[in-house]
Amino acid sequence: MSEPETTSKNLVEISRLGLDSFAPAEAIISDVKHLASYNWVEASTPTIAVPGSPARWSAPRGPRKVNEDSGLVYIAQNAARHPDSPLEPLFRSLYIEQPSFDISSIDVVTDRNNIRKLLSFINPDLATHGLDPFTIQVDMAAQTAIFCRDETATYEVIGPGQFRGFGHEFEKAYTIPQVRDSTGHHRIISYRLGGVSFLVRHETDGCVGDSKPVVKDETVTTEETSVESKLTIKREGWVVPRESTLEIKTRVSHKPLKLSEIAPQVWVSQTPKLVRAHHQRGVFSRPEVEDITAAVKDWEQAHQEDITKLVALINRILRVTRSWGGSSTIQYNVLKDTLVIKKVERKKMLPEDIYSRWAKPIPVDATEKISEHRPTLASRKSDAGKNTSSTAVDQDEAAPEGIKANPANLQHEENVATTAVGSKSES
């Protein structure tokens, strides 16, 4: 069978029909490793704390009334706070925590959101709010495809009379920030799927367990703060194991949240724990922390047809973008129900010193810490006071209304307590 696409010199149009002919027999996420993490910190210039820490789960006893969400919420915080290079914090934190990481061993660098969009193209029934138009920007660095999400709105201000649920206020009541002035915790993991190696960034709502701070050197070296960068880096926080991280969801009691509704999200980020918080008119009963590891593996097995087609799609994207080099865009065409990959000319996504990492040789005596975490070439085929400025929303979810931002520091006129939060699907 021919490739499920239409091709011209600088444009490739892909249909989901026929992708199964190029799909692997099986596609299971394996070799999952936590690599790095950081928190966005409220400041006058783009500032992150590395490794940072997710907020700690601390449920009050008994039912609690929670206010409706209001004020500033982020849709894509990395782009809102650092529009010049939304992916730069990923690489800066990675090379601070894993200075000898072999980036050339990675096929795809991406946010979780992009994989979810491509999976929704394969099966629109897996999309939380239906399959809408989307765009993903792509840069090639050697043989690695760097995916950057492209959103119309990067934040939203929820005004009086606008109901968006209770999710953000719930997190302020049920979690304790661990990094001062934090507005969101982001983590970078690596894994393999269907012979493709991924580096995935995602936001984490919180963590369970006692905090165990690790002393960090507050000095930031020249290599960690490039002269080409507008990003400020602080050394603060401690590494929290992936096994302790959790996703938080809120839902009205008469429409209980099913795991299948959020399985694609937690599958892509391999988040092991879930809090399903149900309420009646904003009054929440005490929720429990669930270990969903086995349930997500079951979901993965049950959706092999979709996941193997996803791998076939990503492999096709890689073949096209590698052959072109440079920059391109991936767009979902609603009218044709196809993906369109188009070669484009635009500014590079990253500072030049980061691109040089693909050509930098890896020392033979790489540290034990790095060898434990980085994928090798042979194996290829994340109590401080609350701030009063903003609320972060999981970067996987897009609000129905919003503003495309270009500020280094976003602050709302009203005082809105800061918390690191996730997508809150309300009904």
Image (cartoon, helix red, strand yellow):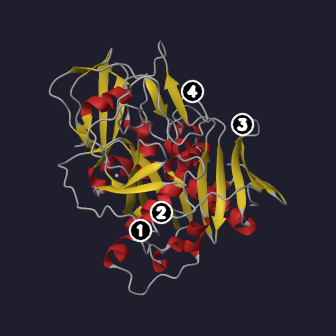
> Where residue 365 sits in the image (x, y, percent)?
38, 86
N-terminal label among 1 and 3: 1
On the question of residue 309 being in view, the answer is: no
Q: Earlier in the sequence, mark 2 or mark 4?
A: 2
Which one is in front in this view, the residue at disc 3 or the one at disc 2? 2
Give the quadrant of residue 386: top left
In the picture as drawn, the residue positioned furthest to the bottom comes out as 364
Q: Are marks 1 and 2 in contact (CB under 8 Å)?
A: yes
Q: Residue furthest top?
A: 161
CA distance for labels 4 and 1: 41 Å
Q: Which residue bears the numbered disc 2?
A: 225
Helix, strand or loop for disc 1: loop
Viewer-side residue, 268 vs 352: 352
**Mark 2 falls on what kind of element?**
loop
Q: Which residue is mark 4?
A: 400
At 58% from the left and 78% from the top, the residue drawn is 359
Q: Nearer the viewer, residue 250 or 394?
A: 394
Quarter occupied by residue 357: bottom right
Q: Callout 2 environment at 10 Å: few (<14), some (14 to 19), or many (20+)?
A: some
Residue in the picture at 37% in, 77% down: 371
Counting every numbered tag in the picture gives 4
Q: Position of residue 427 (x, y in %)?
A: 43, 21
- From this view, report whether residue 427 is shown above or below residue 96: above
Give coordinates of residue 109: x percent, y percent: 54, 60
Q: Residue at x 20, y 21 (%)?
A: 63
- Residue at the disc numbered 1: 221
Report whether residue 266 is seen. Answer: yes
